Image: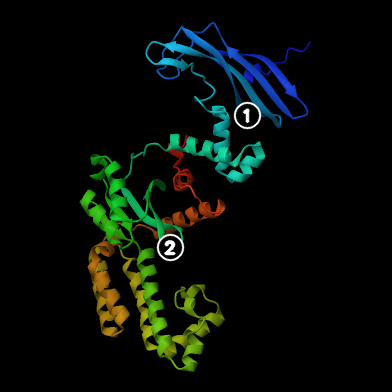
Amino acid sequence: MSGLSIAPFFRFCRAKLVELVFNPELVQVALVVCPNERFTPICSHCGKPVSAVHSQHWRLIRDLPICQTHSYLIWFYRKLRCPRCGVRAESQEVTDTHQRVTRRLAQYVSDLCQHMTVKDVARHLGLNRKTVKAIDKQVLKERYATIDWQGVKTLAIDEIAVRRGHRYLTVVMDYDSGRVLWMGRERTRATMDEFFAQMPAERRAQIEAVAMDMWQAYIGAVQHWCPKAQIVFDEFHVIKDYNEVIDQIRRREYAKANKAGKDVLQGNRFLLLKNLQHLDAQACSTLQTILKLNESLTTAYVLRDQLRLIFQTRDCGEALFLLLDWCQLAEASGVPALRKFARHLMTHAYGIVNHAAYPIDNGKLEGSNNKIKVIKRKAYGFRDTDYFILKVKQAFDHPKSAT
């Protein structure tokens, strides 16, 4: 008779494996587990030993597959007469109260969901999609129940559109580690107040710089909660706003142009927005034609390259000088859209100049946004916003804080 046993894979401190039943037709195996009477049962509510037993019960719990076979535990347990809590079920080490899967299966499901869709995991394990999502969500809620503030000195704030109709989520990242600390609905001042209210006062005092776009709700919240922090407007957001100005000028010039001018401008919007090194020979030729025909677009195009120079210096004094010079050129151009944008930049000059002292790279901000969009597309959109936020936090989890 063979002495092999699967008991080592089912080591339970207060319970023992007493029987195994295999159903070859359903490809299922059931393991009967009973309380080990050598141990005093533990109340599931208060965690204290209780000797008085109220009644005996059993439940069916799904466990990890065994050799591609669905595995179940027929778990016998007792209800106890706890003097502190009343009638309570005894603590069951393999699962939480009212759960129908073991903790190790729940962790396995969550691990799979990090790389696969909920639908694929459900199909792989033979579970309902709602069950898989609920398991993954619960595991992630336990992991990210609290924010790890350790070492946070530089923040990056951005927003991402989650639905059509200007529905946004605000994303707050620890810039140095790349961890997503928090996500909140909309992009209002109240959204940011909710985040900073959770941050300990001593940590708020240690925030050195915050990168963001020129959105007044974010600016006001940082100035109120972290008055010592330097606000930094990174190059990506400033150039992005300026590209909208170029597009606005292009539309105005298109409306004024004759038929020949409209033929040149039509369909060439992105030629004016792309960097010259990213254009092929034919695109460069078309761009040269556009710039020769229209003085306003030529001015706007040249000023974009000069605007980038402001973000290349590491001297605040030089950055201010370059910004003032740029704004004077924009005012002198006589182009209404450029003059309006120059006044906008002067209103936010402090954040642009601060970039020289805190050269926060826009690549990390944009990279995080793209990664979040991939998460959203992978799931074909998230109807459960809370679950989506947890999945984003998991995707940006720092290795030191991962469990």
The residue identified by callout 1 is: 64
The residue that appears at 52% across and 85% down in the rendered structure is: 285
Residue type (three-letter) at the residue carrying disc 2: Gly
The residue identified by callout 2 is: 165
Q: Position of residue 118 (x, y in %)?
A: 58, 44
The residue that appears at 71% across and 27% down in the rendered structure is: 28
Q: Position of residue 144 (x, y in %)?
A: 42, 38
Q: What's the image's color scheme?
A: rainbow
Q: Position of residue 11 (x, y in %)?
A: 59, 17
Q: Quadrant of the N terminus?
A: top right
Q: Nearer the viewer, residue 376 or 286?
A: 376
Tell whether 273 sits left or right of 28: left
Residue 320 seen by the camera: yes
Tell whether 157 sits left or right of 119: left
The residue that appears at 25% across and 44% down in the rendered structure is: 204
Under circle 1, the secondary element is strand
In this view, 249 is above or below 125: below
Residue type (three-letter) at the residue carrying disc 1: Leu
